[in-house]
Image (cartoon, helix red, strand yellow):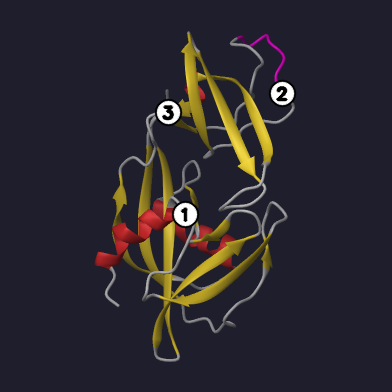
Amino acid sequence: MCKSIEKVTAFITQERNGVNALLVFKHPTAGIQIPAGTVEVGENIETAVKREAHEETGLQNVKIEKYLGCIENELDEQERIITQTTKVYIKPDLNAIPYKDKLTRGLTVEHHSTYKDFTHVTYFEYDKFPNPSYVAYNISGWVPNKNLSKQKTRHFFRLSTTEETEDIWELKSDRGHIFQPFWTPLSPKPEIVSPQNRWLDFVYEKIHT
């Protein structure tokens, strides 16, 4: 299996009407989140966090104020992460029929078993989060071990912006979803989706409000 995949998370803050605020966004199916994503091949983590901030909030001008540290591995024992976009095969054989859909780099999957150079995995997407009603997408099959890792490292940054924005706005993501970024007070801690809510516990002692 390949080395660790690196992730970045952007805690974007701004003083608004005398209150320290944090920028989060509402995903149409995945709930309220903090801007975050996967570091691309050949990209440094500073560039990655600014890119993710732009892609998920639309902000053009953000400044890194502080590196807040990292969590060395977020994966549970039965989880793996896709290290490069890969075909998924119906059996552990490169000559087997692959599914039409591929698993893209950065996705976290559930690990079931390993056979020679392949691992059997499953990936789920739900209709909404939290409290899903049904599985909206499911793919299960065999992927080459070289396209998987047991290690996912997440880096945390505090960013600021001088851009003037509304309290809430909308933008279209690269996958066609409509995101709704909005400002929320830093205190009390906002309610965001799991496992991102654990990120707040990690960084709040490092953020001076």
How busy is the neighbourhood of tag 1: few (under 14 within 10 Å), some, or many (20 plus)?
many
Q: Amino acid at mark 2?
A: Tyr
Asked whether, in this view, residue 158 is left or right of residue 142, the answer is left
Mark 3 residue type: Gln
Indicate the quadrant where residue 186 lies. Answer: bottom left
Task: Name the magenta segment's main secondary structure.
Answer: loop
Q: CA distance from mark 1 to mark 3?
A: 27 Å
Residue 7 rendering spot, x and y as whole percentages: 43, 47
| Dot placed on the residue nearer the N-terminal end, 3 or 2 | 3
Residue at numbered disc 2: 99
Left/right of residue 153 with respect to residue 31 in the rendered view: left
Residue depth check, mark 1 versus mark 3: number of the one nearer the observer: 3
Q: Is residue 51 visible?
A: no
Foreground residue among 182 and 102 = 182
Residue 78: mark in rendering = 3
Q: What residue span does the magenta drawing correspond to?
A: 93-98
Distance Cα–Cα, label 3 vs label 2: 23 Å
Q: Is residue 42 visible?
A: yes
Residue 163 x %, y %: 52, 81
Return the residue at label 1: 48
15 w.r.t. 101: above or below:
below
